[in-house]
């Protein structure tokens, strides 16, 4: 079976930022997502954030943590919470269980997307992350998810504790 390589595309047009996740989005892409979250936190004139998951076949928990970070990066700066568009029932169920509805508006289809925005989407280069950088990000992502609801706290506590323990071990 062919694994659909994860890709991230982005566009920023008249105050609307669109982040489109395609394929199998997992922790290898979280450096790229992290950078986007940081950019958004500093973007002047930002009015809306749309995260399009319609072409994503899978989004792992680390990538989800960074989507949550995107929401937190823009919290208080937008009139409305960021929107996630997801029509895959599995993806929607996962977002529901993880408490994303508290931080995002979840939709199955976009209300109306200006065609210019779809044309403006450019694929973001995957940012390399070394093993330590990855571990830090996995830790950060799951800490963010743990703060979202009780279900996540119970689910990710063991992983976070394991990663924290690894972080304190001396490197040779």
Image: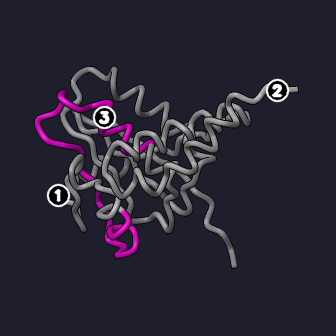
Disc with the residue nearer the chain's start (2 vs 3)? 3
Looking at marks 1 and 3 on the same chain, the residue that comes earlier in the sequence is marked by 3
Mark 2, Cα crowd under 10 Å, few <14 / some 14-19 / many 20+, is few
Q: Is residue 82 magenta?
A: yes
Q: Which mark is residue 72?
A: 3
What residue sits right under mark 2 in the picture?
Answer: 171
Question: Where is residue 38 shown, x and y percent of the image?
Answer: 42, 26
**Mark 1 surroundings within 10 Å by alpha-carbon count, few (fewer than 14), some (14 through 19), many (20 or more):** few
- Between circles 2 and 3, the one closer to the viewer is 2
Write the residue at 68% across / 35% down: 129
Magenta region, residue range: 66-94
Residue at (79% x, 25% y) in the render: 170
| Residue named by callout 1 | 112
Tell me the CA gap for discs 2 and 3.
32 Å
If the image is split into quadrants, where does the N terminus sit?
bottom right
Name the outermost residue toward the right: 172
Closest to the observer: 43 or 67?
67
Residue 41 screen position, x and y as percent: 33, 25
34 on left or right of 108: right
């Amino acid at each position: 079976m062919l694994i659909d390589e994860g890709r991230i595309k982005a566009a920023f047009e008249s105050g609307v930022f669109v982040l489109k996740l395609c394929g199998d989005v997992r922790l290898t892409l979280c450096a790229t997502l992290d950078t986007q979250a940081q950019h958004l936190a500093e973007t002047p004139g930002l009015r809306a954030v749309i995260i399009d998951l319609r072409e994503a076949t899978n989004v792992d928990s680390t990538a989800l943590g960074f989507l949550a970070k995107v929401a937190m990066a823009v919290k208080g700066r937008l009139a409305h919470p960021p929107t996630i568009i997801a029509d895959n029932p599995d993806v929607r169920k996962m977002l529901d269980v993880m408490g994303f509805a508290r931080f995002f508006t979840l939709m199955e289809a976009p209300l109306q997307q200006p065609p210019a925005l779809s044309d403006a989407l450019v694929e973001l280069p995957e940012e390399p992350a070394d093993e330590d950088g990855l571990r830090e990000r996995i830790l950060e992502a799951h800490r963010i998810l743990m703060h979202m609801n009780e279900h996540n706290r119970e689910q990710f506590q063991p992983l976070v504790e394991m990663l924290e323990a690894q972080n304190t071990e001396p490197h040779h």
